[in-house]
Image (spheres, rainbow, N blue to C red):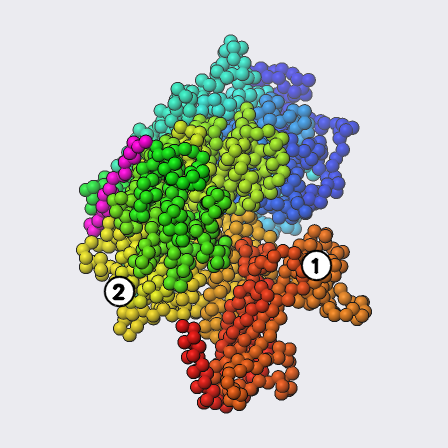
Amino acid sequence: MKTSAFIGGSKLLLPEGIKRENTKMYEEVTIPPNEPMPVGFEEKPVYITDLDEIGQLVFKGMKRLNRIQSIVFETAYNTNENMLICAPTGAGKTNIAMLTVVHEIRQHIQQGVIKKDEFKIVYVAPMKALAAEMTNYFSKRLEPLGITVKELTGDMQLTKGEILRTQMLVTTPEKWDVVTRKSVGDVALSQIVRLIILDEVHLLHEDRGPVLESLVARTLRQVESTQSMIRILGLSATLPNYLDVATFLHVNPYIGLFYFDSRFRPVPLGQTFVGIKTTNKIQQLRDMEEVCYDNVVEQIRAGHQVMVFVHARNSTVRTAMALIEIAKNRGESSFFFADQGAEYGHLEKQVQKSRNKQLREIFPDGFGIHHAGMLRQDRTLVENLFSRGYIKVLVCTATLAWGVNLPAHAVIIKGTQIYDAKRGTLVDLGILDVMQIFGRAGRPQFDKYGEGIIITTHEKLSHYLTLLTQQNPIESQFLGSLADNLNAEVALGTVTNVEEAVKWLSYTYLYVRMRVNPLVYGISHKAYQMDPGLEMYRQELVLEAGRKLDKARMIRFEERTGYFSSTDLGRTASHYYIKYNTMETFNELFGAHKTEADIFNIVSKAEEFEQVKVRDEEMEELEQLLYNYCELPAAGGVENGYGKINILLQTYIGRGEVDSFSLISDLSYVAQNAARIVRALFEIALRKRWPAMTYRLLNLCKVIDKRLWGWANPLRQFPVLPGYVLSKLEERKLTIDKLKDMRKDEIGHMLHHVNIGLKVKQCVHQIPSITMEASIQPITRTVLRVRLTINPDFKWNDTAHGSVGEPWWIWVEDPANDHIYHSEYILLQKKQVVTNEPQHVVFTIPIFEPLPSQYYIRAVSDRWLGAEAVCVINFQHLILPERHPPHTELLDLQPLPVTALGNREYESLYKYTHFNPVQTQIFHTLYHTDSNVLLGAPTGSGKTVAAEIAIFRVFNKYPNSTAVYIAPLKALVRERIEDWKVRIEEKLGKKVVELTGDVTPDMRAIAKADLIVTTPEKWDGVSRSWQNRSYVQKVAILIIDEIHLLGEERGPVLEVIVSRTNFISSHTANPVRVVGLSTALANARDLGDWLGIGQMGLFNFRPSVRPVPLEVHIHGFPGQHYCPRMASMNKPAFQAIRSHSPAKPVLIFVSSRRQTRLTALDLMAFLATEDDPKQWLHMEERAMTDVIATVRESNLKLTLAFGIGLHHAGLHERDRKTVEELFVNCKIQVLIATSTLAWGVNFPAHLVIVKGTEYFDGKTRRYVDYPITDVLQMMGRAGRPQFDDQGKAVILVQDIKKDFYKKFLYEPFPVESSLLGVLSDHLNAEIAAGTVASKQDAMDYITWTYFFRRLVMNPSYYNLDDVSHDTINKYLSNLVEKSLRDLECSYCIQLGEDNCTIEPLTYGRIASYYYLKHPTVRMLKERLKADCTVEESLSILTDAEEYAELPVRHNEDQMNSELARRLPIEVNPHSFDSAHTKTHLLLQAHFSRAALPCPDYATDTKTVLDNAIRICQAMLDVAANEGWLVAALSICNLVQMVVQGRWLHESSLLLLPNIEQHHLHLFRKWNQGRGKSRCGGYQGPVECLPELISACEGRERTFTSIVANELQPSLILQAWNFLSHLPVIEVGMRLKGWWEDSQGQNERILPTAASDTRNEKNWVSVHADQEYVLQINLLRINTGHQKRKQDSKAVSPRFPKAKDEGWFVVLGEVDKKELLALKRVGYIRNRSTVSVAFFTPEKTGRYIYTVYLMSDSYLGMDQQYDIYLNVIPASIASQVNTEVSDAMNDLALE
């Protein structure tokens, strides 16, 4: 039943049973409390004990859920439905949220473990106070599950790492909006959100409603586009149009919508509304106090406590005093006195101790006050007193209702006007606050009902009545901020055209309400009938907003096509939450030359501050503030709003004290917003490249953050220093630099306070400061490369600097043109500062002729005032490189037919009839002359065919010689081999051999080869010792593919090969022809000169002569951080595919495997919103399903279904082949690949997208640009000669690099040499080989290099001052000196007496032979010790320089630390981001066979193992050279561990495939309980491999019988194959030499089984100090009858490449731990003989020598034999004879 009534002049429907009272003073309406809802028979309370264990843990301490919770339990706890719950305040909605949280957590439990990184839960609470309370509540409840809950609000910032480690975030709508606007690495963040809880959804109709709308719309669109499950739970107070809200939240009204009215309150509420009639302000106050008092007394008399809510801090005291006053006047004060209990006296003492004067005064009267301005301890005291009943009346502000759960029987709201700083005026108390406050009425345990009384003015009476009796539907406020929200979506990239924007609007609450109630939104009835979906109307809205934004330059809006694209300005506005009008103001007022005062003026005119009004009562105080604190003139003065803002901002900076309450809240409002606005201005200035302005604004940002003027002493930033000290420092004008130079006692004396000196000194050194050094290298005449080294120069202190890093801004400014050429943001990591490790930054900037005098590089700290550095780039001595000669013109020739080859066999290799224009033009030179050739032509012009033509000439002319083809990557070598094995080997019958790190054929195969295909490093290693390798000398042609890679880090190797080839051909009679193939070059002439090419063989075509023309688009993307920038490129990539290549193949290049996955997932998300999501799949879905079934990689299974392939090194070989075939045959349209694919495989596509041009470099731990050649190579894959008439390339780069790429993608990039960095290593190789024997030779050697050619052409690049003859000579001899000095320090060479000749030393030879860097050998020499254990050898191995290149990618330091916990050997916990530590962990994991955290680690392990063997071999040589027996044996063991992937201390039986730790008992048990009757064979438990081999005696069934119980036959067969291939070697030994008593030379056979030292027969007599040869005969007896031809490869399933089985023979003396000889023995096919020469000791006596036969492939197969020598006195005759016979032998040899 409702009754209607006129109240305060409006007609209302009111519940019945209402009491009304109308007096002259006020009108009062009382609504009695409802009867509670009767319990339905369906309702059953849910008991906590019935929940699963997780539920019980979380709801610990509760018995059961209340009624509401029990009703919604089923939906909340056991489904994934979106829900909307409308219920009165205090009905326990928080626990409903908890139910959904627990449901979410339960979905992420696997094997009893919560997968914490799979989900995030976001709780959006409308107020910070509430957010804090919720954080506490959820933390406590979820603690037992180990779930972290953090608050993320304006007050509580979290770092990215903290957000990642948190599972539940409690945040405010604005904050979450900002976070999701930024698509930061937080793209990942918003993507793993699985549950969003929106508290107080009825806020939709308040000012902050639009934020909620945009949040929900963004989330819902994400759900639809990514097909991810994000559950939304809306909690709200009771509202009339709950169905609309349910529609908006996509709640199914039959399942997820619950509506409870006020009858469900735990304590029913009676409401009283009082409207005061008078309009006189002062009278109003009095009347309110009077009415208030009447109501208070009434409650107190009934024995209840009362809370009175007022709306300003100072009015709490005023009201309390007024009430006490009235009580005294009426003589009723005794009612308010507290009961004088025992505790009372004690508590009274506590109150009297309080600092708060008013509190002390009013407490005895039974009153208390509570507001946010009081101290924490006072507030707690008051809460405590009230809950115990010692305070009868508590006067408080609304914060109490939000932040603290403190109920009272009756609640009175006195007055409904509240001051709002944002609006700058008094506004009506919001419905939200009223409900929250009324929610505090009635204490659930004690009261039958509660009472809420609201005292307002008469005209507002009806307003509150309607609100509280839910008369008005809530409407949307979205229209007001449509432009801002549209801008945010455009900046995010989720809305890119009008159509999408219209669709986006359909997700808002605005759209729901417009359709229900069109008139409110200005849509006429007729318009609604015409356009029922409101398509047209939404389009109008979007167009209007788009035009507004375009006018403000926040987006670019092309009305013709309807496309939106975001601009820097718009992105800045979106990230910093700046309103559209403010942006307009900025556009109008902001210029390149403004003073600080101007900036303050601009900021104070921002729309954010528009509502702040000036009140008369504040004038006086503002005048004082202006006079006291304003350092800058405040335009507008006290009279204007913006003047007031300016004054307040400066007061805030000057830390001024403000009295009046309204000013206090204005001040904090100004402070919060100004910081954000100035940051935005800073970003705008930086983007506009205004140096002075940027600098000024960055400083102002810090001034506001730190509340310090820029001219204050920077030490004021340290709170530890007392104020008087700082003032003294400022008086004395002591700058930081001066203080740095003073001692602590000097400072102390100057301040008249000795002890403080130390503190000041510490602070001075903690102010971040850096030193910068820049070196410049001209690349061309217009582009400079700058290498900047930044050295941190301060002490790190976690309290001052945090624990992550210090951010800096760096920019390059040109003072003359007032322009910034480059800017970047850098984080100096804590670790770098502590270890003093410099940071390197490389970038390019333009220069103009005539050269400017100088540029500045300015570095400014992002956080600290007074922390900056400047570095000057001087152009005085800069020599610009020579201009480049023109390109070769492509002549218009008749295409040459293939028959020109004049050989039917050759012609049959080509599928086409004519050569293309490039091949035609160079054919004659290649096929009919022997001159060297350099061919520069764009990718795809058929350079491989050119190589073939040159090879055919060798086959024709020099049939006995060899051709060598060098390709830069193993993948390219593989591709050539696969092609040429068929075409050249099978069809032409020529022998083709592959020679790479993975494949090393034996010498005979190489010697017979006609064509060797190899990589630069391998060929360098092989040709280093060319004198004694005949096949190197019979090379007739050297073809180097991609020779422009000279400029990259592997370039020096190419340089060395060519220089050496030229050197060899000048020393041997037969010249070697060199053919270089490359992309179009800028400086082909230099390369030509170096290759010895005349005018004849130089062909350098321009980039545009591609067979298929290429159209290139470059797009810049903003963003400091790599991951978010990559994420923001996905949508543009998708659009590029749709516009440029909707149906033709597309290649997308990304920098890492992780990016392939992320990009694919995003593309699939965009496809999901299309009409045909499978549009890129060009085959039957059924057929595809069959293919997917064969694929291993899980991500690939997902993507292939959509026609997207992934391609990277982490894939299994078979998966890769599958993907390649599908793509080449156009079954899938899109392939996302890592950059290596550009080189490795030749599948062109119609469109190539290069997504990001930098990759993470593990060595320097930051993102580095691809070499430009890589980008060209990737672009070169666009356009398929057979199918396309043009190719498209879209390059997505960071915006600051856009100009650079624009320049170099169209004009070729000059190739510079990078030999300088590695010169020492290559010199060492030549010294070891004997080609360089003096300093002069070294100088000559350098003149052969390409480096020398470029040195003369571009001297400044190499730091050469001028090009006169003397300078160059001096420069080169310095170079040689430095390199030789380095080598000498590394024990590689020795300079002769004359300081000119150079002698190679053993270590130099080791470095050269094993292709190691000289620092590695030096490290081995210095760290290897005589008794190194295997563990120590392992750590020495992993510290090799070679491993510094191993990438440590993003976040891998965390993975490393987790991996380390599972491994046996501890590593240094501070170095998890070091490549060496990672290597160590990977090797340990390899030995432990531990699971690796991600597929990248598997390929990294492969890289590590690739290098491990040669480094170990070098270590072994070092140990042998030093004669260290223990170390040598440890290293042999380490080699075995590396090859087999097991620890040395584990049982060697574990080498058998499929045999694990838990199978070993089978071997131990075997043989027990059998009689000894079996003849032969091994008896006893089997513990190691030799015992097992002996036990099985070559019978497979014996082995099967051991393990049959636990393994399947197929697995047993694998193990048996391994076992039967193990080498069983029999050893025989004899000693050769000269004995005095025997005639002539002879030998003695040594017993091998001797162990009895007492038996004289076992001792062999030898003469002292004489050479003997120990001859060891090795005989292989393999009992396993092998089915296949014996091959020399070891069985090593865990080792990535084929390994030859070999042996180390070590002769040592155990007593002295001395190694006497070491021999390496290759594969023993049947028998081998090894001779080891050694000298006997000089002293006579008995010695025991030991011979070790160590396998280099297997653990547990080693043998050792003792030799007993009895040394008798030396015999002159025998010594002479040995020497004579040696001489005879030498003659015989010659």
On-image quarter of the N terminus: top right
Seen in the picture, residue 1230 relative to 165 is either above or below; the reply is: above
Q: Give the residue at x 44% y 62%.
A: 1410
Gap in angstroms between the C-alphas marked 1 and 2: 66 Å
Residue 39 in which image quadrant: top right
Lateral position of residue 1010 relative to residue 1202, left or right: left
Residue 1288: x and y in percent read 40, 31
Q: Is label 1 in a helix, a strand or a loop? A: helix
Whether the magenta-drawn stretch holds residue 868 is answered as yes
Tell which of 701 and 1616 is nearer to you: 1616
Q: Give the residue at x 18% y 55%.
A: 1364
At label 1, counting other C-alpha atoms closer than 10 Å, the crowd grade (few under 14, some 14-19, many 20 or more) is few
Q: What stretch is highlighted in magenta?
A: 865-894
Q: Is there CB contact under 8 Å for labels 1 and 2?
A: no
Tell which of 57 and 812 is nearer to you: 812
* Main SS class of the magenta portion in the image: loop
Tell which of 782 and 1532 is nearer to you: 1532
Q: Give, as a three-letter code, the residue at label 1.
A: His
For this orientation, the residue located farthest to the top is 526
Residue 108: x and y in percent read 64, 42
Residue 1293 visible (yes or no): no
**First-in-chain label (1 vs 2):** 2
Lateral position of residue 599 relative to residue 33, left or right: left
Residue 220: x and y in percent read 55, 29
* Residue bearing mark 1: 1558
Residue 1722 visible (yes or no): yes
Tell which of 939 and 63 is nearer to you: 939
Q: Give, as a three-letter code, the residue at label 2.
A: Gln
* Residue bearing mark 2: 1336
